[in-house]
């Protein structure tokens, strides 16, 4: 197998700017929660954030907070708190970690940003079940606990094509949110403002696509593990000029890396597609594991989930509906397999790693034969690793290392016999 090297993590210089705008975002949320003039909305990560921003809400994303709980390795100790009030350890560990943090009165925000004690108290909760039903249950619990309205979109699922019938359905559901949001915000929806926000989201998503597609170069200038960090502005700040400015800078830095032949991993030998969620509490360890094996994990469906080419400021609500319906996670296996095959070819992939996340079945695509079907069709081998996005009790580091090393050895043998 490949001779192991001491992994070198190449710092992306734009990281400092990203940390500053994320800091500004969280302090602004905190200020909004304390202001009598401003309103706060909580929104699922692929919910109607554009509508909320256009109506003047400061927007908090609980999934982002839950990922921070995972990345700081706080989640595993907090999940049992939610279990004690009836939420199974088998369900979404974002939900259980976040509710557990609320019950324990702790937050990673307090450590990262002095003066912030907790996520901002919401005036309204807005969900979209295009990811899973758990987000509706999650927000409904907070609605009862905090006595605030909870509204949302119940999305069609498992479709191959995004038909006009489906777009009509979700468009009507988005329009039905507006009266409640106008009542909470105290102002009518300004359609011109919505067009401007949708235009900014469209520009943000286009730049994020270009950032991720730099990894098609060999060597790849960024990895999946880099992308999980730098996707932050695309998740919480889409629809703002700050996110657009950030991705312009990041894209320029990555293009400079391509021009100079600088890879994120030294002496890149193998190129891997990551299917599924990251293990937030093991980002550094996994990054170093693969770098030590001269392997770039360089593209994923997860990070690509914040690419929405359908946003159209000339038809904002219908284009929002189409964008939210086009999300990978909400599509049929037939669509997903076609999409992944296209990505394997585009990024010149040697192997696929499926993360079977214990508490996230909707983001685990290894349970109904997809790895075997794709390998038969493409000849590209795959490995399934068991774990979880947040609950580290479901993660075996030793087993992961052993399986990954054996898989890379398999890729090396294939390369020698090609």
Image (spheres, rainbow, N blue to C red):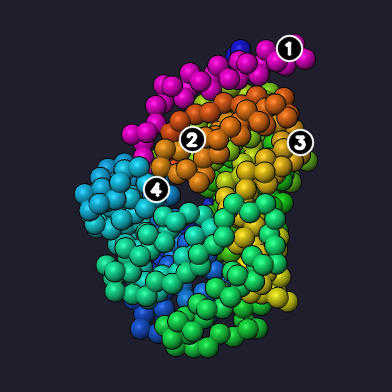
Disc 3 residue crowd, few under 14, some 14–19, many 20+, Cα 10 Å: few
Secondary structure, mark 1, is helix
Q: Can you say whether 192 is above or below 113 in the image?
A: below
Task: Give the magenta-colored segment's residue range.
Answer: 390-418
Q: Nearer the viewer, mark 2 or mark 1?
A: 2
Give the residue at x 37% y 75%.
Answer: 149
Separation of residues labelled 2 and 1 (CA atoms)? 30 Å
Who comes first in sequence, dot 3 or dot 1? 3
The quadrant of the image that shows the N terminus is top right
In the image, taking residue 275 as reference, residue 150 lies left or right, namely left
Q: Which mark is residue 345?
A: 3
Give the residue at x 53% y 22%.
Answer: 404
Q: Is residue 410 magenta?
A: yes
Q: Nearer the viewer, mark 2 or mark 3?
A: 2
Closer to us: 417 or 361: 361
Give the residue at x 42% y 38%.
Answer: 358
Q: Which mark is residue 416?
A: 1
Disc 2 residue crowd, few under 14, some 14–19, many 20+, Cα 10 Å: many
Q: Nearer the viewer, mark 3 or mark 4?
A: 4
Q: Position of residue 180 (x, y in %)?
A: 45, 82
Name the quadrant containing residue 193.
Answer: bottom right
Q: What residue is shown with label 4?
A: 92
Secondary structure, mark 2, is strand
Closer to us: 114 or 214: 214
Separation of residues labelled 2 and 4 (CA atoms)? 13 Å
Q: Nearer the viewer, mark 1 or mark 4?
A: 4
Q: What residue is shown with label 2?
A: 356
Disc 4 residue crowd, few under 14, some 14–19, many 20+, Cα 10 Å: many
Who comes first in sequence, dot 1 or dot 4? 4
């Amino acid at each position: 197998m490949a001779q192991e090297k001491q992994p070198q993590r190449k710092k992306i210089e734009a990281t400092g700017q990203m940390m500053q705008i994320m800091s500004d975002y969280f302090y602004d949320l905190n200020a909004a929660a304390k202001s009598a003039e401003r309103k706060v909305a909580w929104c699922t990560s692929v919910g109607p954030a554009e509508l909320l921003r256009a109506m003047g809400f400061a927007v908090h994303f609980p999934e982002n907070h839950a990922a921070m709980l995972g990345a700081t390795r706080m989640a595993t100790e907090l999940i049992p708190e939610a279990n004690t009030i009836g939420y199974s350890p088998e369900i979404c560990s974002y939900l259980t970690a976040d509710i557990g943090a609320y019950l324990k009165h702790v937050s990673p925000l307090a450590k990262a940003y002095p003066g912030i004690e907790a996520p901002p108290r919401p005036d309204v909760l807005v969900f979209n079940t295009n990811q899973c039903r758990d987000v509706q249950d999650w927000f409904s619990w907070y609605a009862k606990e905090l006595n605030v309205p909870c509204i949302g979109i119940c999305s069609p699922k498992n479709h191959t094509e995004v038909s006009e019938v489906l777009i009509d359905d979700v468009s009507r559901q988005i329009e039905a949110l507006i009266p409640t949001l106008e009542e909470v915000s105290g102002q009518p929806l300004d359609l011109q403002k919505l067009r401007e926000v949708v235009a900014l989201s469209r520009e943000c998503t286009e730049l994020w696509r270009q950032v991720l597609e730099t990894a098609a170069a060999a060597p790849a200038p960024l990895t999946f593990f880099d992308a999980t960090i730098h996707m932050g502005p695309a998740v919480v700040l889409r629809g703002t000029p700050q996110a657009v400015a950030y991705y312009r800078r990041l894209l320029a830095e990555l293009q400079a890396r391509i021009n100079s032949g600088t890879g994120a991993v030294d002496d890149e030998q193998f190129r891997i597609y990551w299917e599924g969620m990251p293990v937030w509490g093991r980002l550094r360890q996994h990054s170093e594991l693969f770098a030590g094996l001269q392997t770039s994990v360089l593209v994923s469906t997860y990070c690509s989930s914040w690419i929405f080419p359908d946003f159209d400021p000339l038809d904002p609500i219908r284009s929002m509906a189409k964008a939210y319906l086009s999300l990978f996670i909400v599509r049929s296996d037939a669509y997903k397999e076609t999409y992944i095959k296209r990505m394997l070819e585009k990024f010149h992939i040697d192997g696929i790693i499926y993360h079977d996340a214990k508490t996230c079945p909707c983001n685990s695509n290894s349970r109904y034969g997809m790895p075997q079907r794709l390998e038969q069709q493409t000849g590209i081998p795959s490995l399934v690793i068991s774990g979880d996005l947040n609950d580290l009790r479901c993660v075996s580091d030793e087993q992961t290392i052993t399986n990954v090393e054996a898989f890379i050895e398999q890729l090396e043998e294939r390369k020698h016999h090609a």
